Image (cartoon, rainbow, N blue to C red):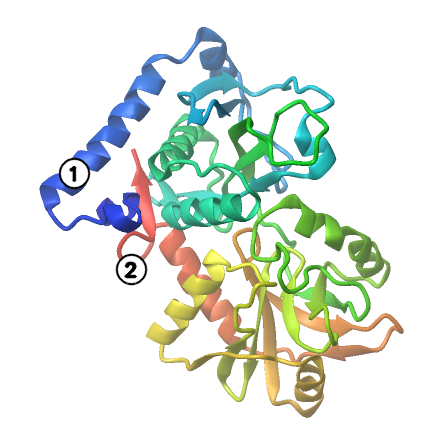
Amino acid sequence: MLPNNSCKVYLSGAMQLTCAYQVKSVISRQNKRVLKMMSEISSAVKNAIENFIVPKDVGFGTLISPVMIEANFKDNQWSDLQILPYGDITIPPTAKVFHYAQEIFEGLKAYKSPNGEALLFRPEQNAKRFNYSAKRMAMPETPEEMFLTACKTITMLSKRFIPEASGSSLYIRPFMFATEATLGIKPSSEFKFMVLASPSGSYFKAGGLNVFIERSAIRACPGGVGTAKTGGNYAASLLSSTKAIDHGCQQTLWLDAINHQKIEEMSGMNFMCIKNNKIITPELTDTILSGITRASVIELAKTEGYEVIERTIEIDELIDGVKSGEITEAFACGTAAIITPIEKFIEENGISYELPKLDTPISLKLRSHLLDIQEGRKEGPAGWSQIVD
């Protein structure tokens, strides 16, 4: 069982406190808010939870927990969080989200430990990134305590729905969107914040990925919203995903918008490769989303003695390295993917570059270590795996 090392991570920026009494006080306030919400659960919510059945095969993101949490922003303030049965929502057709795509989201996971506890993985990092995205999209920030309370509460309510198989989890989706009903092109003054949860299996099926090299379309450009977790970035990748599928690929590898030479990221995850036994990943720019799994993998790899280099990687270097054997591995890393090896890269003309099949790949060693922490078999750095109880 992991100790709960999460005390300080519930505090943000200027609120970082060192006094144990003050830290406990903040956590106590959060727990009181959770308890108040739990005490106000309606009979409809209770019935939804009691009657919910998890099928044997859950897939990824297709089965939704029977509860959801929401709050509304109006007149420059947030309402209290509410627990509701999962269901449809009513929004006016003129809501700005439909016309100007003013929305953001996050993705994090709760795992089930060997002792049956629910473990959230680094949720405070998602809270920080959510607010970073909000700033970029001209949206109000959500108080970090509110974000964490919502994630903690939906985890508690959905605890018995968390799949037990390794690599499975309760995938948690906080999101916010503009609800002001006017067609003028300006930032909305009204928003809805919601949190859903999905009992999910592995994102990718067993085995490695085939990755399509996109040399013409772009996902993000300098000065744009590439570092914000907003739907527009993912919408920009969808046309290429159809090309990827046509080429037998599960993901797209994106290059820079200017010269189409620098590797940036994949459609829903970050990219890493192993060259001469060193882990190399593109350095973060304003066109690459800062992945929480990416940061965790870098930290873990360093503790295991691997050299990690964050720098520009050009597509020609990748292809030449795979051909010469200097690059022995490449892998995707992200909340959904965890760490998933890449088997081959495929060009639009059908040419492919295949990576060797290794007996003990570094990527799978790192995946095993990370899952051991996330699923409570090993203790990780303080605050990484947080018991929700």
Between disc 2 and disc 1, whose residue precedes? Answer: 1
Badge 1 amino acid = Lys
Q: Residues within 10 Å of mark 2 (few under 14, many from 20)?
A: few
Q: Is residue 213 left or right of residue 37?
A: right
Q: Position of residue 34 (x, y in %)?
A: 32, 25
Q: Residue under label 2, please give it.
A: 381
Q: Judge whether 308 appears above or below 108 on screen.
A: below
* Residue at 26% over, 49% down: 14
Would residue 107 be visible to someone looking at this image? no
Res. 210 image quadrant: bottom right
Distance CA(mark 2)–CA(mark 1): 20 Å
Q: Position of residue 356 (x, y in %)?
A: 65, 81
For the view shown, which residue lies furthest in the right direction? 349
* Residue at 65% over, 44% down: 231
Q: Position of residue 237 (x, y in %)?
A: 74, 54
Relative depth, front residue between 230 and 186: 186
Badge 2 amino acid = Pro
Judging from the image, what secondary structure is the residue with disc 2 in?
A: loop
Q: Is residue 138 left or right of residue 260?
A: left
Relative depth, front residue between 312 and 161: 312
Number of labels in the image equals: 2
For the view shown, which residue lies furthest in the bottom direction? 324
Locate the C terminus and report the quarter of the image it occupies: top left
Q: Judge whether 165 appears above or below 312 on screen.
A: above
Q: Is residue 240 left or right of residue 203?
A: right
Would residue 158 be visible to someone looking at this image? yes
Q: Using the image, tell me which numbered label, if any, was put on residue 24.
A: 1
Badge nearest the viewer, 2 or 1: 1
For the view shown, which residue lies furthest in the top direction? 43
Relative depth, front residue between 162 and 42: 42
Q: Judge whether 74 appears above or below 43 on screen.
A: below
